[in-house]
Image (spheres, rainbow, N blue to C red):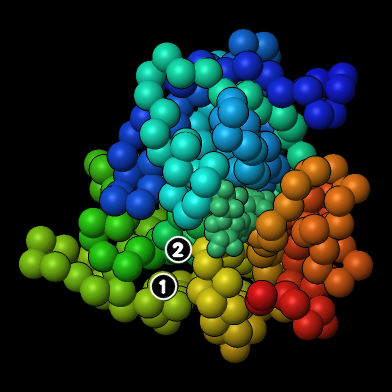
Amino acid sequence: MNQSNIYEPIRCTVDGVIEESPAIKTIVLIPEKQFSFEAGQFISMTVPDVGEAPFTPSSSPFKTEKIEVTVMKTGLVTGAIHALKKGDVVGIRGPYGKPYPLENFAGKEVLLVGGGVGLAPLRSLFFSLLHTINAYEKITFCCGAKTPADYIYKNQILDEWLRYSEKMPVSFRITVDKKDEGWNFMEGLVTTTLDNLDIKISNSVAVVCGPPVMMRFTTLKLLDLGYSDSDIYLSMERKMYCAVGHCRHCLIGPYFVCKDGPVFTYNAIRNEPSVWA
Ligand SMILES: Cc1cc2nc3c(=O)[nH]c(=O)nc-3n(C[C@H](O)[C@H](O)[C@H](O)COP(=O)(O)OP(=O)(O)OC[C@H]3O[C@@H](n4cnc5c(N)ncnc54)[C@H](O)[C@@H]3O)c2cc1C
């Protein structure tokens, strides 16, 4: 926790707004006070006079002077976030929840599978993995979106990340559900990127984030490929308010997404009936 009062927000000034896709924007925030987090943890962001909602920072945990949050517009708070402009002020509290357990990934081949706005926490995780790249055998990043226009971080992925493969054990599989004439990468659901993987599954962990239907089918395919329940890490989302384990809105069975998660192994939650809700 960055604050002594768990509910007290830190003031942040909006430094910029990046239009990622028609429905998704990345908001660049400058916190008034030092604010740190680990990849996978989330913050609660308040738009004054509107309300607050949880988001996972999408920027590097190692660059804390600016924090980026990638937000899909779905309703009241996210609509107000999309209307923000440079110089506006918002509040953030947190970080909350458990981060990705990087210590469990050491010495392994790490497979990241993200779809749509689910790429947001995975981008933060990817930056963390790059920071300690020698600790991992290899990173394979599978990214998906509905169409090329819906691809978040597209310029960064195509102009910067693809080049990482030249100097680091990092590779990408990039797909869209439906391509257009300018698209030179794969076509098909993100699960198609898991075909013919060059990965030693017995020494690999997989991290999945995306809409519930994508998480479900990706998990099923990973199990088919031979991943064990405890080597599949899922970033779970539930409607939540307090973010600190009081209001019980975010329960999956006995687990609070806000404090026991949002990162869970499939092994931990697989028997909960509401897992893919
Ligand atoms: C731990 C965590 C991390 C998250 N990280 C991100 C992120 O990085 N980027 C991002 O865009 N979104 C993220 N979300 C989802 C985000 O919090 C919701 O989209 C947001 O709360 C919606 O608020 P609203 O007032 O705009 O929508 P509302 O007006 O409250 O609702 C509009 C619609 O969105 C649905 N909705 C609301 N909350 C959620 C939710 N948590 N999950 C799924 N559907 C929801 C409602 O059912 C309704 O259909 C995260 C959620 C959690 C729990």
Residue lying farthest to the left in this orientation:
181
Sequence order check, earlier mark of 2 and 1:
2
Q: Which residue is mark 1?
A: 190
Q: Amino acid at mark 2?
A: Gly
Figure check: 82 above or below 229? above
Residue on which disc 2 sits: 115
Residue at 53% across, 67% down: 211
Q: Left or right? Give the position of 77 relative to 25.
A: right
Corner quadrant of residue 107: bottom right
Of 248 and 177, which appears nearest the observer?
248
Q: Is residue 36 left or right of residue 122?
A: right
Q: Residues within 10 Å of mark 2 (few under 14, many from 20)?
A: many
Quadrant in which residue 219 is drawn:
bottom right
Question: If the image is split into quadrants, where does the N terminus sit?
Answer: top right
Image coordinates for residue 117, horizontal then vertical, percent: 46, 54
Out of 69 and 232, give the one closest to the viewer.
Answer: 69
- Whether residues under marks 2 and 1 lie with C-beta atoms below 8 angstroms apart, the answer is yes
Q: Secondary structure at mark 2?
A: strand
